Image (cartoon, rainbow, N blue to C red):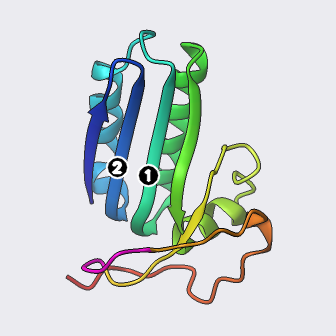
């Protein structure tokens, strides 16, 4: 997994890509905790290129939300891949997390396909987990 932090004076964005599992989840939490401050109005996570997420990845997302809430910073997931959404949906966390839109996960080397479907809870997912073969 790779992750990137970008921020403006008021918005903090995290972009995740690849397999979101134990191997990098601790580094993500540490990096986020070092950079976040109550100077930000919003924390947004782009998960449109996440091919796989396990429980440690989910725990990292919940950690980021918890820290954001503690600092009174608005939190959302700006975009999420279908495999990642399905994991959050199965764990009933899709209701807790503010998910703006979903994308259909394709190949890591191509662009995700944006979905305008506002009712994310009714998405049909054919592949729950797509493990990157690279």
- Image quadrant for the C terminus? bottom left
Q: Tell me if residue 22 can be seen.
A: yes
Residue at 60 percent across and 65 percent down: it is 85
Part of the protein shown in magenta = 108-112
Mark 2 vs 1: CB contact within 8 A: yes
Task: Name the dominant secondary structure of the magenta segment.
Answer: loop
- Image quadrant for the N terminus? bottom left
Residue at the far top in the pictured view: 39
Looking at the picture, tell me which residue is in the foreground, 92 or 9. 9
Residue at 48 percent across and 31 percent down: it is 43
Q: Secondary structure at mark 1?
A: strand
In this rendering, the answer to whether 14 lies above or below 67 is below
Q: Secondary structure at mark 2?
A: strand
Separation of marks 2 and 1 at Cα, in angstroms: 5 Å
Looking at the picture, tell me which residue is in the foreground, 133 or 35. 35
Looking at the picture, tell me which residue is in the foreground, 126 or 8. 8
Give how far across and how far down residue 124 sits, in percent: 71, 83
Residue 10: which quarter of the image?
A: top left
Q: Which residue is mark 2?
A: 15
Q: Tell me if residue 60 can be seen.
A: no
Q: Which residue is mark 1?
A: 46
| Magenta region includes residue 110 | yes
């Amino acid at each position: 997994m790779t992750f990137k932090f970008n921020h403006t004076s008021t918005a903090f964005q995290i972009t995740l890509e690849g397999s979101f599992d134990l191997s990098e989840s601790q580094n993500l939490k540490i990096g986020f905790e070092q950079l976040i401050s109550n100077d930000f109005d919003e924390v947004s996570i782009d998960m449109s290129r996440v091919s796989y997420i396990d429980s440690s990845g989910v725990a990292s997302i919940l950690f980021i939300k918890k820290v954001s809430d503690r600092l009174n910073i608005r939190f959302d997931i700006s975009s999420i891949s279908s495999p990642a959404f399905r994991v959050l949906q199965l764990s009933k966390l899709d209701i807790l997390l503010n998910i703006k839109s979903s994308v259909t996960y394709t190949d890591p080397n191509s662009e995700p396909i944006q979905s305008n479907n506002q009712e994310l809870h009714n998405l049909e997912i054919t592949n729950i987990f797509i493990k990157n073969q690279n």
